[in-house]
Amino acid sequence: MSSPNLSQTTATATAIDEELVAYLDGELAAEEAARIERRLAEDPLYRARLAQLQRAWDLLDTLQRAEADDELVHSTVAMVAIQAEQDARTQKLRIVRRRTLGWLGLAAAVLLAAGGTYYLVYQRLAQPYQQLVRDLPVIERVDEYRNIDNVDFLKELARENLFAGEVDDGM
């Protein structure tokens, strides 16, 4: 049960600190500043917290300010320049890679179109000769078949699958 009270107390303390820091910075509107001043007049714990924050604030002013020496500035500028150069190279490589992939894609599309066109033209031109290619075994032996007087003999050869293509039985 103590955890919710602790978290509520922490949240309240954080809100009070934020309010007091804003008051010290002069960031509050006039009515909010007046409200804080009334509470400071009435609440000694609130006044004590403001005094703590004011002391911490004053101590910050006494800290020595760090000055960046010329070597730090030079090395920082050099690192920024190197990083900018690397970023420029990376961007240039991306552009080159994108262009290369574009050209490769275009070349692949042209090759695919050329291959498809070749295949279609080949099929179209070869179509009339396909029957001749199927009949080639018969054509090669046409002289031998001329000497046969009986069509029934040719039908018997067809039934034995001695011809490359099918023979119409209606002879």
Image (tube, rainbow, N blue to C red):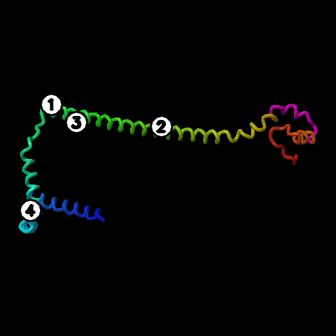
Question: Of the residues tagged 3 and 2, which is closer to the observer?
Answer: 3
Give residue 56's position: percent from left, percent from top: 10, 51
Q: Magenta residues?
A: 139-151
Q: Is residue 140 magenta?
A: yes
Helix, strand or loop for disc 4: helix
> Which residue does the numbered mark 4 point to in the structure image?
47
Nearer the observer, 45 or 16: 45
> Which residue does the numbered mark 2 point to in the structure image?
107
Question: Of the residues tagged 1 and 2, which is closer to the observer?
Answer: 1
Q: Does the CB distance between marks 3 and 4 fall below 8 Å?
A: no
Indicate whether 17 appears above or below 72: below
Question: Which residue is rendered at x = 54% and y = 38% of the image?
Answer: 114
Horizontal side of 133 relative to 108 (left or right) equals right
In the picture, the disc for residue 71 is: 1
Circle 1 Cα neighbour tier, 10 Å, few/some/many (<14 / 14–19 / ≥20): few
Question: Which residue is rendered at x = 14% and y = 61% of the image?
Answer: 19
Give the mark nearer the N terminus: 3 vs 4: 4
